[in-house]
């Protein structure tokens, strides 16, 4: 058996003495498609940061591909797409240059080989951004920018894609294309972990839902989540997926 991609065990973390995530145990196996949902401020982004090893648990353990998450140094196995891909907004670089960065963990400071460039080209094609390759990242729509960042993750041959509200500010048509792309990548074996505020999209696309509000209110198959009262309990309202009532 291969080791889990993500393995959190009894993780508690707070920015102050008060924990914002508490006693979280979460195992994600290779190839899963998992959505994290919860009200604003429920600890979703913090949880992703713990998964990625950007923060250390106050107690409990966080492991990535079997290694301690905060010591994980196999960066090419991870693709992280931040909310709004905001870090990119100020970067005066082209889409091709962004995607090329995906090869850096493999080549270090060396030059990209022909094979590396081929992977860059393949990634651009997969996300449908070839014709934008020489456009500056600052001149893209939100949806195009997100696809450029997915292409970077693909070029790095990442096994795990972690996405923090990837479709915020993206128009409805591009959102559909975006989810089609994620489904294709997942079908090819890439593990997907995302935060999504649009519960309709979660129900339609994710196989498994983790419903969070400081602690885990629900963790299981999406259809069981729809039938459960986890949403109402976590959101503290009568929110229901099928009535479209959201946070
Ligand atoms: P979500 O992603 O579900 O909206 P977050 O993980 O961003 O939730 O935040 C959880 C809680 O932690 C919130 O109360 C938020 O105000 C607090 N928080 C988030 N980031 C920081 C930070 N860098 N410093 C202090 N508090 C933070």
Image (cartoon, grey):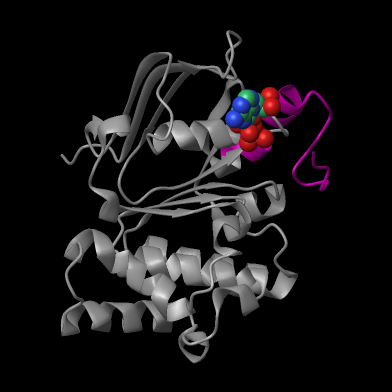
Is 30 rendered above or below residue 132? above
Q: Quadrant of residue 236?
A: top right
**The N terminus, quarter of image:** top left
| Residue 172 location (% of width, % of height) | 73, 69
Closest to the observer, 209 or 166: 166
At x 73%, y 22%, the residue is 233
Q: Is residue 246 visible?
A: yes
Residue at the extreme top of the image, as rendered = 17
Q: Nearer the viewer, residue 232 or 110?
A: 110
- Which residue is located at x 48 percent, y 64 percent? 182
Residue 43 shows up from this direction: no
Q: Position of residue 36 (x, y in %)?
A: 56, 39
41 or 242, which is in the foreground? 41
Residue 29 picture quarter: top left
Question: What range is drawn magenta here?
Answer: 224-247
Residue 103 is left or right of residue 144, and the answer is left
Vertical side of 110 occupied by 167: above or below? above
Q: Is residue 241 part of the magenta span, yes or no?
A: yes
Q: Quadrant of ligand 1?
A: top right
Residue occupying the point 60% across, 57% down: 86
Q: Residue at x 49, y 75 (%)?
A: 93
Depicted 138 relative to depicted 109: above or below: below
Q: Is residue 163 shown left or right of residue 159?
A: right
């Amino acid at each position: 058996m291969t080791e889990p991609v993500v393995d959190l065990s009894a993780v508690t973390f707070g920015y102050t003495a008060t924990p914002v995530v508490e006693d979280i145990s979460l195992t994600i196996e290779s190839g899963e498609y998992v959505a994290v949902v919860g009200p604003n401020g429920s600890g979703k982004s913090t949880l992703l940061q713990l998964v990625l090893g950007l923060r250390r648990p106050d107690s409990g353990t966080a492991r990535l591909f079997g290694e301690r998450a905060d010591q994980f140094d196999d960066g090419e196995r991870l693709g992280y797409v931040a909310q709004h891909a905001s870090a990119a907004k100020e970067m005066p670089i082209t889409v091709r240059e962004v995607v090329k960065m995906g090869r850096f963990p493999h080549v270090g400071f060396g030059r990209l080989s022909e094979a590396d460039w081929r992977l860059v080209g393949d990634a651009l094609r997969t996300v449908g951004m070839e014709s934008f390759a020489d456009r500056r990242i600052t001149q893209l729509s939100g949806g195009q920018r997100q696809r450029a960042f997915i292409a970077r993750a693909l070029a790095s041959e990442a096994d795990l894609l972690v996405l923090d509200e990837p479709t915020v500010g993206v128009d409805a048509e591009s959102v559909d294309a975006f989810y089609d792309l994620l489904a294709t990548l997942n079908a090819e074996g890439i593990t997907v972990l995302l935060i999504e505020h649009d519960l309709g999209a979660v129900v339609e696309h994710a196989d498994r839902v983790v419903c969070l509000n400081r602690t885990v209110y629900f963790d299981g198959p999406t259809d069981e989540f729809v039938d459960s009262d986890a949403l109402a309990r976590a959101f503290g309202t009568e929110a229901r997926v099928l009535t479209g009532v959201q946070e």
